[in-house]
Amino acid sequence: MSQISVNNLTWQYDGRLTPAISNISFEVERGGFILILGSSGSGKSTLALCLNGLIPQEMTGKFSGEVRIEGLLTNKASLSQLTQKVGVIFQDPESQIAMLKVEDDVAFGLENRLVPLNEMKKWVKKSLKSVGLLENKDDITSNLSGGMKQKLSLASMLAPMPDILVFDEPTSNLDPKSTQDLFNMIHKLKQSGKYTLLTVEHKLDYLMDIVDRVLLLNPDGTLLADSNPRNILKKHFLRIKEYGIWVPTVFWIGIKLKDRLKEKDISIEPPLTIDEAANKFKLLLKDIKDDEINIGKKVNVKEKKESQDKKFKQIEVKDLNFAYTNKKYVLKNISFAVNNGDFLAIVGPNGSGKTTLVKILTGLLKPSSGTISLYGKNILTIDPVEIPKKMGFVFQNPEHQFLSDTVYNEIALSLRLANKSEDFIKKKVNNLLKQFELIELKEKNPFSLSQGQKRRLSVATMLLWDQDILIFDEPTFGQDFKNSQQMWNILKELNSMGKTIIVITHDMSFVSELTEKVVLLFEGEIKYLGNTFDLFQKRGLLLNSNLMEPLPTTLARKLKISFKDGVFPTTIDEFLYLIN
Amino acid sequence: MPEIFFRYIEKKSIFHSINPSIKLIAVLIMFVAVTLVVDPITSLVFLLLVILSTKFLSNLKYREIITPLILSISTAAFIAIFNILFYKTNFVPELPAIFNIGRLKITDAALKIGLSRGIRVFSLINLSIIFVSTTDVTALVDSLVQNMKMPYRIAYGTLVAYRMIPLLSDEFSQIQASQKIRGVLPKKNIRSKIEFFFKQAITLMVGAIRRSDRLALAMDSKAFGASKKRSFYRPKRVEFKDVIFLISTILVILITYYIMWKIGFLKKLGILA
């Protein structure tokens, strides 16, 4: 008997016209690692909830087919039993923790299952230890960082000793360091051999080496394919691309390389993992040329647009310090300038002061000392109503800004408040709707849009005043490949129109591929200020600041290939140029 | 981040060690006892008892509870002054004045009522401060479920909601910030401001409802509510010392009543006075 057996599973939520998932069948034996892939809205999370019985037992809708977990029917067996066998770790660290203290939260699930006190104590200790939170057992849960909260959720799920663990995009709200930590933990869980793991995840680069099998879902919630990762990517690459699903970066590089090598009649199978890529490309390098590997000169693929306009300082930050009331300084001695047309990234681990810095830049917070000048004028002397007209800011969570009942009104809102004529508003809003492919949706409620559409709407609402400076907070966070690429293109286009773009981001491939300048914040201080390419050559600095280097750099390092002056490529194109 | 001014202060003391449910009952009894006293001198004696117990039984330092203390003093002072100045007997022409403030006549009854009400309010707020500062919320809920047979689904459900409050207030300020930064500010009339507030509240609610859905799923995944009973990670018992504490509270009240009655201050108990 298989450990999990799913037969013709169909589920339709009440009030929806079509099923979230339909006709899904698969079997899982003990101990595997299964990756569930699909575009957003394809029913990945729904599938996860079907496994521990919450669907259909706790939700209303139409259920057909059957799911058995170690023989137990999920629509019949008690939830206490089912949730004990299948632990689920969800996406949002904030809404999984029930109790005020770390230890109590781990005990919570055990108490509900009537585990006696002395066993409870043992299990709580053991599971906290396994995620490295034993020292924090008395901490208040709301004070933990996002990464620690996810570890706590994992501990709470491990405590009742499940056989199956389901991760539903567990890292999408975490910074790169915490993501890596959690992945390491998942690696360990896999190696222990005690668990069957099912994961919904789109950051695949550091996970592919343990994936045994992939379930690939169609957007309509049916199962397209169920096979090993190599087969899936080989056979269904076009579909995967069409659905906007992330693929491992090395696979992407492999595909591009394959195209380029076609002319030379060399064929290459795109690799799945970093190690595999290193090995494959090494062979390739031997094939083509064994003379010298340090070839060429560093190419500037991001060909700088030669602007005729003179550069001038739009924003200047001088000796900025900031502390919240009588606590320690969050920002120390910050000085930098932003010129017109810059494409600047502000990077650094969570808690390094990025958001505080931007709040000061936009006048939401007042500096404790130091000055911010906007076009040469101290920002504190500018009327707060005027700042948004000079500098647009797109928040991380688009929903926070939605106040209107339709997409059209949402964009029109601030123009109406500024008493512009309806004719003017109509023209302006319709242009923006067209530019951001939202015109068909203009009568829809903003909250009912998809993730990617919400993002685009929030960018559109910011561009009303033709500001020359635009600031984005995590514009690509937690989005699928298609929406992410769309966002990249929007930002690139805005920048090429001459707008200054400032982006706060954790996404190093974004930083390396798009931006020209970086401000690296660490514990409230600027650790690096300069051009993007040079930052990624400083490996020690990256390590010390908990930043990941871009994958092409890692790969080149492994292959021991570099440009003539000893620098490593930082973008995919640079890498390809080098290897060609 | 503004501190919530009523909060638990973790320490070791007699008050901290009493079973939370018993402590709650004792505090409620004390509430009733204080409320029923009309006479200002007796009220003052009770206030003294409250202050002494804070000093000797709670191990709290005054600076730790200074914010709520200031709040309670100002509330009490306001109530006292308001009653002394405007109590109904001041406006009865036949009654004699004990003194005048401007054209306002202050009668004997107004002075007594004012002082007694002020002192009682001060005592009541102080009692609440002691209770909140010496009682861990989780321990209170644990104890209510285990010792008072409160249904656990309701109790822990409430506790989770309580945990969400700071998150909600955080989120609300983020919503406000994102409007401000976008240049979306209400017009300068009250109507526009109210409308704006409600719009933002709806935005907050949409997020809150989604969050509570997610939280409910996560709790269900931990088998919350799957069985009628529950085991307890932090067992709470009513011990001998708790019973003694409760009895002593009642005794102290009765003895105070008796003495004050004997020496002639406490003539009657009343709710409306």
Image: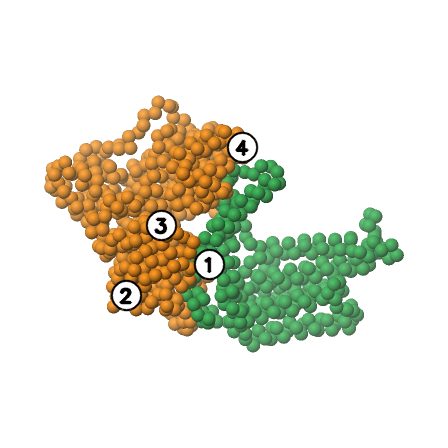
Chain colours: A orange, B green
Q: Which residue corresponds to mark 4?
A: A418
> Depth check: B60 or A485 in front?
A485
Cβ atoms under marks 3 and 1 closer than 8 Å:
no
Q: Nearer the viewer, mark 1 or mark 4?
A: 4
- Chain under callout 2: A
Q: Which residue corresponds to mark 1?
A: A140
**Farthest residue in the front direction?**
A17
Image disc number at residue A41: 3
Secondary structure category for the residue under label 2? loop
Left or right side of B162 for A536: left
- Chain under callout 3: A
- Chain under callout 1: A
Q: Please tell me which of labels 1 and 2 falls first in the chain.
A: 2
Q: Nearer the viewer, mark 4 or mark 3?
A: 3
**Do callouts 4 and 3 point to residues on the same chain?**
yes
The residue at the point 30 percent across, 29 percent down is A304
The residue at the point 22 percent across, 54 percent down is A228
**Do callouts 1 and 2 point to residues on the same chain?**
yes
Q: Please tell me which of labels 1 and 4 falls first in the chain.
A: 1
Mark 2 crowdedness (10 Å alpha carbons): few <14, some 14-19, many ≥20 = some
Q: Which residue corresponds to mark 2?
A: A3
Q: Please tell me which of labels 2 and 3 falls first in the chain.
A: 2
> Depth check: A311 or B270 in front?
B270
